[in-house]
Amino acid sequence: MSQQTFQQTFQVTGMTCGHCVSAVEEEVGAIADVTDVTVDLASGRVTVGSDREVTTAEIAAAVDEAGYQLAS
């Protein structure tokens, strides 16, 4: 039986450079059960792959730790 995987996309504001991307990838990637983080700097989209549905609050906290915010 295969593990179900989840993919969610969030909008992040304030990212302007490669360092921003790295910071967000690092913090979001540290969330338990997150297996993949892809950041599109141009659009501000962060796509998260995980073994469970990660809550918006968890993503918001990680993005905040990186110094940015989820778009409302």
Image (tube, rainbow, N blue to C red):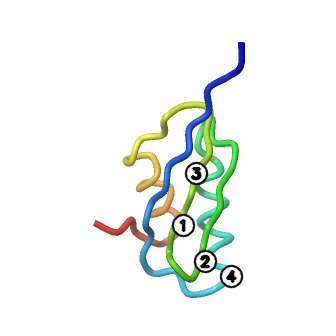
For the residue carrying disc 3, how many other residues have a C-alpha within 10 Å: few (<14), some (14-19), or many (20+)? many
Please, which residue is most extreme toward the left here?
Answer: 72
Residue that label 1 marks: 66
Residue that label 2 marks: 20
Residue 24: horizontal and vertical position, in percent? 59, 65
Residue that label 4 marks: 18
How many numbered circles does the render carry? 4
Q: Amino acid at mark 4?
A: Gly
Q: Earlier in the sequence, mark 3 or mark 4?
A: 4
Number of the front mark, 1 or 2: 2
Q: Tag 1, which secondary structure?
A: helix
Kindly identify the residue that appears in the image at 50 percent across and 49 percent down.
Answer: 8
Residue 42: horizontal and vertical position, in percent? 56, 83
Residue that label 3 marks: 48
For the N terminus, the image quarter is top right
Measure the alpha-carbon separation of dots 4 and 1: 13 Å
Please, which residue is most extreme toward the bottom here?
Answer: 16
Kindly identify the residue that appears in the image at 45 percent across and 70 percent down.
Answer: 12
Q: Tag 4, which secondary structure?
A: helix
Q: Amino acid at mark 2?
A: Cys
Q: Are marks 2 and 4 in contact (CB under 8 Å)?
A: yes
Q: Amino acid at mark 1?
A: Ala
- Give the vertical position of 50 relative to 2 (above or below): below
Number of the front mark, 3 or 2: 3
